[in-house]
């Protein structure tokens, strides 16, 4: 039982660690530029050599970082995250709305709700009805009105409402700007990763086409040799 388990594992020539055989990949099956980058550090590797997925992930991360550094100079934190996600095969797309809403405090939720209600038609209709009722009551009561014309108490209440409403709307707008900034950063990461993926696909397709033409040329040479031998 022990010998069977040991035989199903191999040692990676790059990391020097033991991994299951299913975690090994042929160097010839890797991305051409990535395989060339690995051979720069390990020239003894041949096309039939097998290396572990852990080593491939490490070199894929180095390759993407070097590629980004050549085109953009110094890598930012976002560029490093994109390179790591590309090497690990993970996703960078995130639901900014959900993650941002989960971090809001009770006061922030209340201010967002008040700002949303203050900029809606129900608030305008309710506000107009309240003003109309206030004026009609004071006009109808005549000399006994609690706030006769020019409605000084009403002006005071409106000034207080405006003084409170303005900071609430500004807080809500500031959080909306922060949410938009997170959304734009996430879009940048997604676009950068898509650009790198498309470039790698183009290079891989070109490599496959070149390999296919080489194999066709070898087959033609074999066919020509067979025809010459039969003649």
Image (cartoon, rainbow, N blue to C red):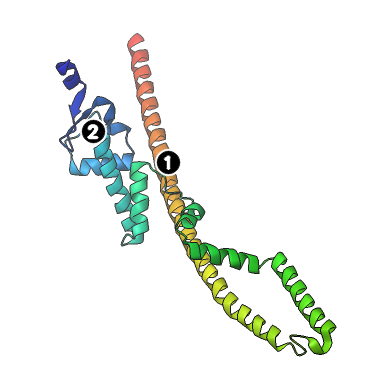
Question: How many badges with numbers are in the image?
Answer: 2
From the viewer's perspective, tell me whether residue 32 is left or right of residue 158: left
For disc 2, the marked residue is 51
For the point 80% across and 79% down, which residue is it? 137
Give the foreground label among 1 and 2: 2
Residue 64 or residue 109, whichever sits in front: 109
Quarter of the rendering containing residue 146:
bottom right
**Which residue, as the protein is rendered here, is positioned at the far top?**
230
Q: Looking at the image, which is closer to me, 20 or 207?
A: 20
Q: How many residues crowd around disc 1 within 10 Å: few (fewer than 14), some, or many (20 or more)?
A: few
Tell which circle, 1 or 2, labels the residue nearer the N-terminal end. 2
- In the picture of the structure, the residue carrying the numbered disc 1 is 201
- Circle 2 packing at 10 Å, graded few (<14), some (14-19), many (20+), is many
**Quadrant of res 13:** top left
Q: Which is more toward the observer, 147 or 95?
A: 147
Q: In the rendered view, does 39 fall on the left or right side of 141?
A: left
Q: Give x and y (percent) for residue 18.
A: 18, 31
Give the residue at x 68% y 66%: 120
Q: In what quadrant of the picture does the C terminus appear?
A: top left
Percent of width and height locating residue 3 = 15, 17
Image quadrant for the N terminus? top left
Look at the picture and state if 60 lies above or below 215. below
* Left or right of 84 in this view: 2: left
Left or right side of 18 for 217: right
Q: Residue at x 35, y 14 (%)?
A: 226
Image coordinates of residue 230 in percent, x first then y, are 35, 9
Camera-side residue: 105 or 49? 105
Q: Position of residue 40 (x, y in %)?
A: 21, 44
Q: CA distance from mark 1 to mark 2?
A: 22 Å
């Amino acid at each position: 039982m022990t010998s069977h388990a040991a035989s199903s594992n191999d040692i990676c020539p790059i990391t020097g660690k033991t991994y299951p055989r299913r975690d090994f990949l042929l160097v010839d099956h890797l991305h051409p530029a990535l395989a060339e980058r690995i051979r720069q550090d390990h020239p003894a590797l041949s096309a039939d050599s097998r290396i572990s997925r852990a080593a491939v992930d490490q070199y894929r991360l180095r390759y993407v970082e070097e590629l980004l550094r050549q085109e953009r100079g110094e890598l930012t934190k976002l560029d490093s995250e994109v390179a790591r996600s590309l090497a690990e095969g993970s996703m960078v797309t995130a639901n900014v709305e959900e993650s941002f809403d989960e971090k809001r405090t009770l006061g922030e939720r209340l201010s967002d709700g008040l700002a949303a209600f203050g900029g809606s038609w129900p608030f305008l209709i309710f506000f107009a009805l309240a003003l109309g009722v206030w004026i009609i009551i004071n006009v109808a009561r005549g000399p006994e009105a609690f706030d006769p014309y020019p409605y000084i108490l009403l002006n005071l209440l409106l000034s207080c409402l405006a003084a409170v409403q303005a900071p609430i709307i500004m807080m809500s707008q500031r959080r909306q700007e922060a949410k938009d900034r997170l959304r734009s950063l996430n879009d940048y990461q997604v676009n950068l990763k898509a650009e790198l993926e498309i470039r790698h696909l183009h290079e891989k397709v070109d490599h496959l086409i070149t390999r296919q033409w080489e194999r066709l040329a070898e087959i033609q040479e074999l066919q020509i040799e067979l025809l010459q031998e039969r003649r």
